[in-house]
């Protein structure tokens, strides 16, 4: 009986899988209506794809809570609808926790799916040019990097921050960051610089060099939930892939 059931299941997969594969299609999204918009800064999505957050080059922030069927503008400042120079956005696995970083000086966090936001600047009441930001899937571990050289780590969802120095006592123009689901593996990239990897929640860091002993303009990073698969993109055209947690 078990053999028959298993054989039927395999037959089902053989018949259905090609149809399932061909059913995946792309559709154009127009969050701002019938407007061509430079979406080249940052996008974030929760685990099931229901919640999407996207930032555009002109400073607008848009949110969808129904898999992109409809979109709404997000204004982080309750008393000010001024568009910001958003650089990084992140959404937790559940879709309630959100992190946005602005080149025009602020870091903000939402704990209720983008309804309200709080100023969570790691440097206190000091404006900085925030560029690199990421958040773990559980929403507890966060990285926030400044264009002019400092990187900050939070292990409590952005309530408190501590400076972390992957490159020693050197300022690095942080460009991108990524974190695995539980916050145990972190990766930070500098523009015209190196990649730094931590496998112990940011306690220590090691330099990793996908392109050998060469500084590079890293502009995109991605990581699997377990931190083993990592993809890095270079300004100018190359992509590097590691399937062993950045070892090679």
Image (tube, rainbow, N blue to C red):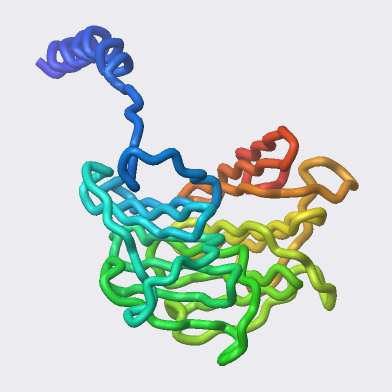
148 horizontally vs 215: left or right: left
Residue beneath the point at 67% across and 73% down: 151
Who is closer to the viewer here, 211 or 74?
74
Quadrant that contains the C terminus: top right
Extreme-left residue of the structure = 1
Percent x, y for residue 155? 50, 77
Between 213 and 32, the one lying in front of the other is 32
Quadrant, the N terminus: top left
Is 148 left, or right, of 21 in this rendering? right
Q: Which residue is pictured at 45% across the width and 75% down the height?
A: 108
Name the residue furthest bottom: 125
In the depicted structure, whether residue 79 falls above or below residue 74: below
Q: Quadrant of residue 63?
A: bottom left
Where residue 215 sits: x, y (%)? 85, 50
Image location (x, y in percent) of residue 66 = 21, 48
Q: Relative to 134, does residue 224 appear above or below in the rendering? A: above
Please indicate, yes or no, whether residue 201 appears anywhere in the rendered image: no
Along the viewing direction, whichever of 20 and 144 lies nearer the viewer:
144
Q: Horizontal placement of 119 versus 196: left or right?
A: left
Answer with the quarter of the image where residue 162 lies.
Answer: bottom right
Residue at image coords 48%, 64%: 135
The residue sitting at 52% across, 63% down in the picture is 86
């Amino acid at each position: 009986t078990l053999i028959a059931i298993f054989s039927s299941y395999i037959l089902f997969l053989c018949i259905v899988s090609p149809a399932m594969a061909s059913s995946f299609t792309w559709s154009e999204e127009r969050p701002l209506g019938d407007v061509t918009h430079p979406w080249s800064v940052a996008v974030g999505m929760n685990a099931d794809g229901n919640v999407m957050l996207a930032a555009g080059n002109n400073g607008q922030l848009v949110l969808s809570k129904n898999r992109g069927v409809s979109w709404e503008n997000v204004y982080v400042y309750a008393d000010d609808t001024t568009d910001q120079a958003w650089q990084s956005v992140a959404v937790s696995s559940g879709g309630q926790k959100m992190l946005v970083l602005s080149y025009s000086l602020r870091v903000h966090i939402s704990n209720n799916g983008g309804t309200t936001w709080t100023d969570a600047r790691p440097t206190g009441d000091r404006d900085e040019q925030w560029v690199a930001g990421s958040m773990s899937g559980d929403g507890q571990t966060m990285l926030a990097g400044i264009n002019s050289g400092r990187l900050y780590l939070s292990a409590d969802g952005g309530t408190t921050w501590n400076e972390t120095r992957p490159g020693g006592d050197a300022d690095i123009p942080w460009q991108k960051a990524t974190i695995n689901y539980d916050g145990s593996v972190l990766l930070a990239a500098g523009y015209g610089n190196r990649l730094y990897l931590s496998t112990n929640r940011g306690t220590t860091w090691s330099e990793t060099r996908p392109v050998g002993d060469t500084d590079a303009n890293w502009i995109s990073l991605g990581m699997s939930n377990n931190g083993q698969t990592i993809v890095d993109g270079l300004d100018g055209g190359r992509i590097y892939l590691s399937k062993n947690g950045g070892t090679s």
